[in-house]
Image: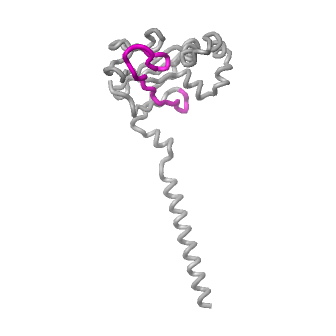
Amino acid sequence: MKKTSVKLYYVTAGWMLLTVLVGGYFLLSATTPTADVKAKYNPNLKSAYVGDLEPGGLSVFSINGKPIVVWRRSNEEMARALTQLNPELTFDQVLRGLEDGTLAKAVGLDEFTFLEWLVVSRVDVGGIGCIVTIKAGDFGGFLDPCRKSQFDLWGRAVKGLSDQNLKIVPSRFDEELQSMLLDVTDMPEP
């Protein structure tokens, strides 16, 4: 009888220890911030208001001394950008798909948002750190006035002395779709 009570004691103690450990694990995991909370308090994550930006318009922001362009492309600019990305596409065909909405449905919301909104650093890191001008050059994208390098509508170096593309800024919209959250962690210094 005594051996049975000792075994019961150890089993009960083991269950109590297991209960405390599982409860402690869930208590600690409930108090650690989730990924969205960590991102919200990231010092390199900055907010830029773009709620009133019309298609074809752009805003230039200086965030921590880093010049950033948020460009909401019009249908014509998106069609030109897609034809620069894939020369087999025709401008009229892409423009028709943009105007009737079939292209947006075909590529999905995330890809269409990436096509419509270009967020890029204005610093040409392939040169001497010159600030590029917007909607300039032979390709309608960006122009480095210091070295005469030209960039297309995707920020890719296509002509001139620059051997590096412009830096695309990781971004996403906030919950109200009025502001963009820009991650300026890896942005080049002017």
From the image, give the main secondary structure of the stretch colored magenta: loop
- In percent of width and height, residue 100 lies at 68, 15
Residue 152 is inside the magenta segment? yes
Q: Which of the 4 image quarters holds residue 1?
A: bottom right
Colouring used for the render: one colour
Q: Which of the 4 image quarters holds residue 23?
A: bottom right
Residue shown at the point (55%, 21%) measured from the top left: 116
| Residue lying furthest bottom | 1
Residue shown at the point (55%, 69%) measured from the top left: 18
Residue shown at the point (51%, 31%) measured from the top left: 172
Side of 114 relative to 137 (left or right): right
- In percent of width and height, residue 8 lies at 60, 81
Residue 133, visible in the rendered structure: no
Camera-side residue of 54 and 69:
69
Residue 98 is inside the magenta segment? no
Camera-side residue of 84 and 112:
84
Residue 76, visible in the rendered structure: yes
Residue shown at the point (38%, 19%) measured from the top left: 162
- State which region is magenta: 150-177
Give above or below for 35 relative to 5: above
- In percent of width and height, residue 90 lies at 62, 12
Side of 141 relative to 86 (left or right): left
Q: Which of the 4 image quarters holds residue 80?
A: top right
